[in-house]
Image (cartoon, rainbow, N blue to C red):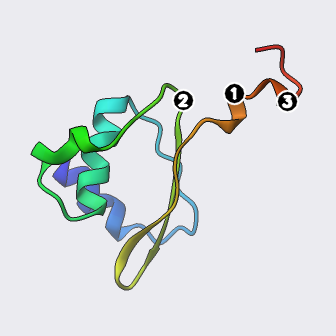
Amino acid sequence: MEVFMQWLETREESTILVCSHGRAMRCMMTYFFGLPVSEMEKFSHKNTGLYQFLKDQNGFNSILMNDISHLNSDNGFPF
């Protein structure tokens, strides 16, 4: 995970999509917030939960955490 996160920090693109399983997302959260991996259970995760971060000179900033509003029946889908 550390190698991936170091690679991610070097990217110059303005938008990067990362798709992953929940446990790996929790590991990434610990990295983004400067916590040890042993703290990953503090982050809740739902299937298809969306996270959005902005990166600036100070690191990664959380914009959206574990959002599942796209699963709401009000979105036009029958589920």
Mark 1 residue crowding within 10 angstroms, few (<14) / some (14–19) / many (20+): some
Question: The disc labelled 2 sits on which kind of residue?
Answer: Thr
Measured as percent of width and height from the top left, residue 66 is found at 50, 42
Q: Residue furthest top?
A: 78
Above or below 79: residue 9: below
Residues 73 and 54: in front is 73
| Mark 3 element type | helix
**Are the residues tagged 2 and 1 within 8 Å (C-beta)?**
yes
Measured as percent of width and height from the top left, residue 10 is found at 34, 69
| Mark 1 element type | helix
Q: Which residue is mark 2?
A: 48
Q: Which residue is mark 1?
A: 71
Q: In the figure, is residue 6 to the left or right of 61?
A: left
Q: Quadrant of the C terminus?
A: top right
Q: In the figure, is residue 72 to the left or right of 9?
A: right
In the rendered structure, find residue 74 and report the number of the disc placed on it.
Answer: 3
Question: The disc labelled 1 sits on which kind of residue?
Answer: Leu
- Which residue corresponds to the image point at 52% horizontal and 35% vertical from the top-left? 49
